[in-house]
Image (cartoon, rainbow, N blue to C red):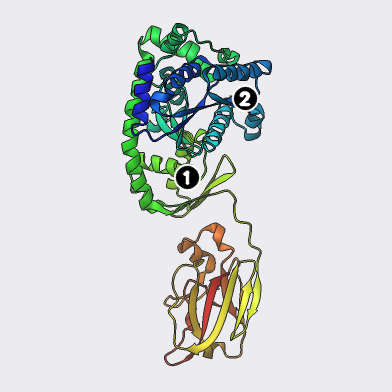
Amino acid sequence: MIRKVIASYRKLDPSGEFQALVMGVSGGADSMCLLKVLSDARRTLGTELHVVHVNHMSRGAESEGDAAFVRDACRALGVECEVRRVNVPARARRRKISFEMAARSARYECFAAAAGKTGKPTAVVTAHTLDDQAETVLLKLARGAGIRGLAGIPARGAAGGVEILRPLLNITRKEVVSFLRRHKVEWREDSSNSKSEYQRNRVRKSILPLMEAELNPNARAVLARTAEVLREDDELLQSLTEEALASCRASISELNLSELRREHRSLVRRVLMTWLTENGVRAEDMDLGLIASIERLIVSRKPNASLKVSGGLNIVREYDRLCIGRTQHAPVPSFSTRLTVPGRAYLAAAGLAVEALEGRGAVRSGGTPGKYPARATISKKALGRKRLTIRSWKAGDRMKPSGMAGTKKIKDILINQKVPAAARARIPVIECAGQIVWLPGYRVARDWLVGPGESSVGLTVREV
């Protein structure tokens, strides 16, 4: 057993980069086995060993007894031990997640904090076994997962900014118990492991034994081996996913849907999962149901739609953009102010500044409404002594765009230009004597074009 675990550890750290190991020890059979092995092998491996026990404060005197047991075992082995107390039931209620999820996040936060204090290259070591791997694969399958979920627990991964090593993943729980008895190492049985309300306990006590009896006596090993194969496949697919994400990413929180739709559906799902993770969606909140909802958002005929995600996040589709954020923009109140020539006006509600300058010649307006800076020129002759107003556009507003016959509604222009609904209230129009002279980022009205050799008024709209 000791040689087997040391060989597994060296595969996970082939260059010997870690000078210290932080090990989570609950007092159960698996962690006591790994504690015994690593305490005996620390000189051979050339590492320090630091133990962290997390008291979940969920079982009263039993939890306190576990902490004392681990502390005494470490003292007997000459290993430094730190006990941390976290009120996991309260954390689960506060975050509205299961006890198991709250306990896991608490443990890894404590492990990462301890690793940060060693002052040396440090990895966290946990005692997950082959049985844990088999149970995880079945749980993921039952809840709905892709290749990454079915790949189970990685032998080496990362959490909280530190590397996590799991050298017992090829060791069965039966082997663990045999080792402990042979070496006369005691362990604690957690009473919660017998409670049927925890899904993992039901898998361990009922489902896996039934599979072994009715389907395959080597079901645990087969499930673990399947996870290993799927993890290798996942690594290849993830490299393709990163390339696809780079091609359709407009920013960290925004995807270009016209690019994303070109990808194979398998990669689309993975791109979405990677993008969601980068933007703070927790792994426990991400499943195939959520991804399917986002896919429906992407292919919907509605150009503007949104989807709420746990944790206060919103996913918003705006034409060919998919955005994620924590809050919606506050509504922009209507605004209106005079604009003198020459002069400058500020629109605090919209966060814009508008400048008017006299000059000669024409500037061709263009771009997209809502994109700044926006520039255009209007005829000074047409303006005469009249005054300009810059204001919010409103329902029923029309203009006579240059190069087009008749009039067009401002609302229709914004829709045709694919301006997101949430951004439209911030867009101004410039008006003179009841006529819309210019929609910033779009065309000037045809009656206000600058003629050859005429004086002009240059208009610029900028964000402030």
Q: Answer with left or right where residue 183 lies relative to residue 463.
A: left
Dot 2: element: loop
User: Residue at image x 37%, y 33%?
Assistant: 16
Q: Position of residue 225 (x, y in %)?
A: 34, 21
Is 348 situated above or below 71?
Answer: below
Dot 1: element: helix
Give neighbour class at mark 1: few <14, some 14-19, many 20+ (Cα, 10 Å): few
User: Residue at image x 35%, y 43%?
Assistant: 241
Q: Position of residue 281 (x, y in %)?
A: 52, 41
**Which residue sits furthest bottom?**
453
**Which residue sits furthest right?**
60
Residue 398's image quarter? bottom right
Residue type marked 2: His
Q: Earlier in the sequence, mark 2 or mark 1?
A: 2
Q: Quadrant of the C terminus?
A: bottom right
Q: Answer with left or right where residue 240 lies relative to residue 364.
A: left
Pick the residue in front: 213 or 318.
213
Task: State how far apart marks 2 and 1 are (Cα).
Answer: 29 Å
CB under 8 Å between discs 2 and 1: no
Residue type marked 1: Glu
Pick the residue in front: 285 or 293.
285
Is 418 situated above or below 57?
Answer: below
Q: Is residue 270 visible?
A: yes
Give neighbour class at mark 2: few <14, some 14-19, many 20+ (Cα, 10 Å): many
Task: Look at mark 2 in the image and give the residue it sits on.
Answer: 56
Q: Position of residue 358 (x, y in %)?
A: 53, 88
Pick the residue in front: 82 or 375.
82
Mark carried by residue 401: none
Q: Quadrant of the N terminus?
A: top left
Q: Position of residue 310 (x, y in %)?
A: 57, 39
Task: Look at mark 1 in the image and give the residue it sits on.
Answer: 278
